[in-house]
Image: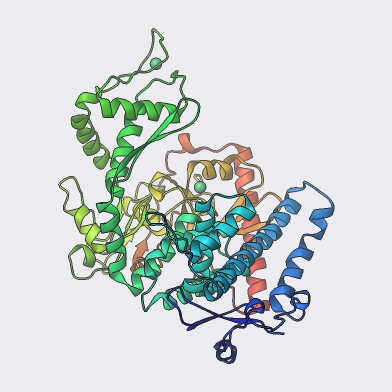
Amino acid sequence: MTTLAAIAKPGGGFDLPIDLAGAVDAAEREAAMAPLVFADDTDDPGPDHADAHLNNPDSDLWQDRAHALDAAMAVTVGEPAWTIDVLGDAAKAAAMIAWAEYREIGAMHTHLTRTGKPEPSPRGVRLLDIDTQCAARIAMSQGLTQRQGEHWLQDAIAMRDRLPRVGRQLRDGHLSPRQFRLIITRTELIDDHDWAPAIDTAIADILARHTPGSWSTRRLADMVDRIIFRHDPDAVRRRHDKANHDRCTWILPGTDGMSSLGATMTAENAAIAYTAILDLAAHTCPHDTRTSDARNSDALYALITGTPFDCDCHREDCTATIPDPTTLATWIRDHQNTAITNGRILVHVIANHTTLAGHDDEPAYLNGHGIISAAHLRNITHRNDTTIRPLNPTAGTVSLPTHLPSDPYRPSAALDTFIRIRDGYCTTPGCNQPAWTCDIDHTTEFDHHHPHLGGQTTPDNLTTKCRLHHRLKTFGTGWLDDHYRTRTGHLTHETVTPEDIHLPGPAETNTTLFPTLDTITWHQPPPPTKPSNPKHHRPHDRTKTKHARRRAEREANRKQRLANEQAGGDPPF
Ligand SMILES: [Zn+2]
Ligand SMILES: [Zn+2]
């Protein structure tokens, strides 16, 4: 039995069929154009719900999902490999449940739209329209507020009308419900545009193709923005202009005698303001008793009110020299200048030089924020505190050095910047830490005594790792990461847990947004005549053994991967 329904758009009409059964093809779409008959507005007995699962691919998929969890429902094991397995199966089941809920709510909405009538309501009272009544059923039956019910309904309608193909990625477990809601939010403004179905298709295709790549929330948002930008270059600018026009501040009473103070502003202003907070807060001595979050909160208050900010250690030997918040504007400016000369610029924007010069309107990328429009980019570059530093002064014609001639361990400034631009965030699966707050890590460990034997300081052996994930790799026992090119030349990451579970790295990096990054060429300066500063770098024997073991493990994994690729045809991407 194939179950298909013709879905009424909110504006009426039956022009957008979606499948309730799985694979959609043209024939089924044709069939779907026939009006759906509901049990309660005719004498037709309607679909037999008891038999609805028979020969239904969605039902079969669900049987598989549920079956995968059978053992987990019976016992707990606690062995990490088992736990990770259970979490993976449960995530797929949860995604399918969320999809089924959305689908059902969407179908109820269709049903009520067809059969129900808006209730007349007294003047001045919100019209009890179909959406309100539909959300009321969801809210009351699930113990939610009307508003929560309305949000759920809106998401279900979004899946039905705007993102049916992305919805199927949710069903198939390529997305979590949380990730799906993120896509709904990011695509809100495409409704009623001709290209909305194309965006749905493009996002769904990428999600299907990139399995098993990992999507952190930031990388997923960047991908969706990039797709929208390709179809409607002005949409990102319009969205920014509207959001910027609506910027605001607020105070929110909280619990336990606390309140929240918030503001929206342009991403670059927020980044600069936040850096100022962190900078002021960082001036206490090491004996300050507050958590860093609490210190930041106090620094923010001092900055806004122009009141003193002090170290709270009360020690005679306190070493803190704290700038006066009232003169902090000057101090920040000086500090910024120092930061720039030290190579730590406060806000990093990445753009093609053609966009900067106004020859095109390609999107730009703001570190820690994501995609911005060319117009927004030019607003930033016109600030008098902006410094523009070309990565490659004469694009495409010069080969850049990978490291300093004196030290093959240290990446050159150009390579350091390149790695941050390319990776965008920490490359560990799920991590959202922006690249400029990350460390640059040699994937295969550098050998300070025999530089030619260890991992090299090259684009293919360096990645961004946040401090936590860098430490986990360096000091955690059994954690291994790798960074390699597949047979098709795709640079990909992998993290291996101590239980030898291979977790895919980011599905995309910024090379998708800036393909010209792949055309930059690099050369290694000639090796130094003597080892680089061996006193500082002399590793313990234990470290040397660990590094050697890791290199061997990576080598074995790579051989295995190559064998798998050759046996199984093309790699997944
Ligand atoms: Zn102190
Ligand atoms: Zn990280």
Residue 202 spot, x, y in % from top left: 46, 75
- Residue 518 in view, yes or no: no
Residue located farthest toward the right when viewing the structure as drawn: 74
Determine whether 395 is above or below 568 in the image. Answer: above
Determine whether 5 is above or below 556 in the image. Answer: below
Question: Which quadrant contains ligand 1?
Answer: top left
Left or right: where 510 falls relative to 362: right
For the N terminus, give its image quadrant: bottom right
Question: Viewer-proximal residue, 24 or 252?
Answer: 252
Residue located farthest toward the top when viewing the structure as drawn: 316
Residue 343 spot, x, y in % from top left: 29, 44
**So how many labels did they put on this image?**
0
Residue drawn where x is 60% and y is 88% of the image:
28
Residue drawn where x is 54% and y is 76% of the image:
114
Residue 550 spot, x, y in % from top left: 62, 51
Colour theme: rainbow
Left or right: where 415 falls relative to 9: left
Question: Viewer-proximal residue, 390 or 74?
Answer: 74
Residue 319 spot, x, y in % from top left: 36, 16
- Residue 155 in view, yes or no: yes
For the C terminus, give its image quadrant: bottom right
Left or right: where 453 falls relative to 171: left
* Quarter holding residue 123: bottom left
Residue drawn where x is 73% and y is 48% of the image:
80
Determine whether 389 is above or below 489 in the image. Answer: above
Question: Viewer-proximal residue, 324 or 518?
Answer: 324
* Quarter holding residue 362: bottom left
* Quarter holding residue 349: bottom left
Question: Viewer-proximal residue, 437 or 249?
Answer: 249
